[in-house]
Image: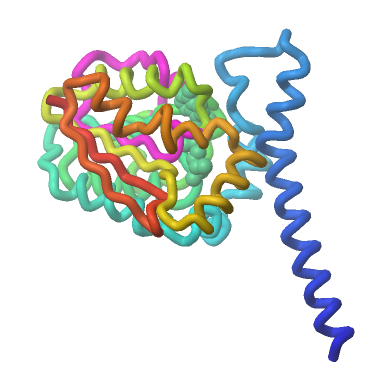
């Protein structure tokens, strides 16, 4: 019996450790290596290989894995955005998704936008492979969606050209000086009355969760911790002015959806 328990515990430890190592290598580890060769810096340098290498994209993008990474709150977060879009009259209007994300967020957002009457949905990402991958999930909406290779911090879309903009877990991956630029761009592209839906991590209320979350960010995503204080997206938008914002938090405050209306 003891031998079985020991073997089970060892197998579980091995599984968790190798999963952690895999994610470290394809996220922060790769960025650390990239940073060692300064000549190779570009506006895509902060993007993890799991978002640029097609094999890795396909290997990681499974709903149960993605839901687990977001502590099984993924569905609730997407539902909040979808509900907002469904309640908006989007007839003859455009909806923008700024940066792709794994799981079913893109198909659900596109379905909600088209259902609310949107004329077109624009999906913008700095990585071409992400757009190809997103397209593979959207066969039934092929006539309604445009795929645009673009940088969230300096977008090519015109001022006031979209009625809604969805940014799903992008900010925590951007270098700090680009976080504010991405928010400013989101504001520039929205028409007055338009809504920005921003899903992100948030500083947890429970100290145990805060400690675990802090460790996660320190190891895997050090650029994300600033969302807890110096780069709190709600505070950034309020400081910027011209927004009416509301925030809903989830899972003891670990996640947030900021809904910001452009005044
Ligand atoms: C939204 S974030 C992370 C999403 C989240 N971890 C998930 O998949 O559920 C990942 C996406 O952002 C894109 N991205 C990163 N920086 C970008 C930028 N400056 N402009 C546009 N897209 C960007 C990446 O190419 C990738 O497709």
Q: How is the image coloured?
A: rainbow
Task: Give the image location of residue 199, x and y in percent.
Answer: 37, 42
For the question of whether residue 131 can be seen, the reply is: no
Q: Residue furthest front?
A: 207
Q: Residue furthest top?
A: 39
Task: Give the image location of residue 73, x and y in percent.
Answer: 42, 58
Q: Is residue 214 magenta?
A: no
For the question of whether residue 152 can be seen, the reply is: yes
Residue sitting nearer the eye, 51 or 229: 229
Residue at 44% x, 39% y is: 169
Residue at 49% x, 54% y is: 70
Residue 115 position (above or below residue 42)? below
Task: Give the image location of residue 47, x and y in percent.
Answer: 59, 28
Q: Is residue 171 magenta?
A: yes
Residue sitting nearer the eye, 35 or 152: 35
Residue at 16% x, 32% y is: 244
Residue sitting nearer the eye, 93 or 249: 249
Give the left or right position of residue 161, taking residue 206 as reference.
left
Task: Give the image location of residue 126, x and y in percent.
Answer: 50, 23
Q: Quadrant of the N terminus?
A: bottom right
Image quadrant in which you'd find residue 76: bottom left
Q: Residue furthest right?
A: 3
Give the left or right position of residue 249, taking residue 63 as reference.
left
Residue extent of the magenta highlight: 147-172
Residue at 71% x, 42% y is: 24
Q: Residue furthest bottom?
A: 1
Give the left or right position of residue 112, taking residue 101 as reference.
left
Q: Quadrant of the C terminus?
A: top left
């Amino acid at each position: 019996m003891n031998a079985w328990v020991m073997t089970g515990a060892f197998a579980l430890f091995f599984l968790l450790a190798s999963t952690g190592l895999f994610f470290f290598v394809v996220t922060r580890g790769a960025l650390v290596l990239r940073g060692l060769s300064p000549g190779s810096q570009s506006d895509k340098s902060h993007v993890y290989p799991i978002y640029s290498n097609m094999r890795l994209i396909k290997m990681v993008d499974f709903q149960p894995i993605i839901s687990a990474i977001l502590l099984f709150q993924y569905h609730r977060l997407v539902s909040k955005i979808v509900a907002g879009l469904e309640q908006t009259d989007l007839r003859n209007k455009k909806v923008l998704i700024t940066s792709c994300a794994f799981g079913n967020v893109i198909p659900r957002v596109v379905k909600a936008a088209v259902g609310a009457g949107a004329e077109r949905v624009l999906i913008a990402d700095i990585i071409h492979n992400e757009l190809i991958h997103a397209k593979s999930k959207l066969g039934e909406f092929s006539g309604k969606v445009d795929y645009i290779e673009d940088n969230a911090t300096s977008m090519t879309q015109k001022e006031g050209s979209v009625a809604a903009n969805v940014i799903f877990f992008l900010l925590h991956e951007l270098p700090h000086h680009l976080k504010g630029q991405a928010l400013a761009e989101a504001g520039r592209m929205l028409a007055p009355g338009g809504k920005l839906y921003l899903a992100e991590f948030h500083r947890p209320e429970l100290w145990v969760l805060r400690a675990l979350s802090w460790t996660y960010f320190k190891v895997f995503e050090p650029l994300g911790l600033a969302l807890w204080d110096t780069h709190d997206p709600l505070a950034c938008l309020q400081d910027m002015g011209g927004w009416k914002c509301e925030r809903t938090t989830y899972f003891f405050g670990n996640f947030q959806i900021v809904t910001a209306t452009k005044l």
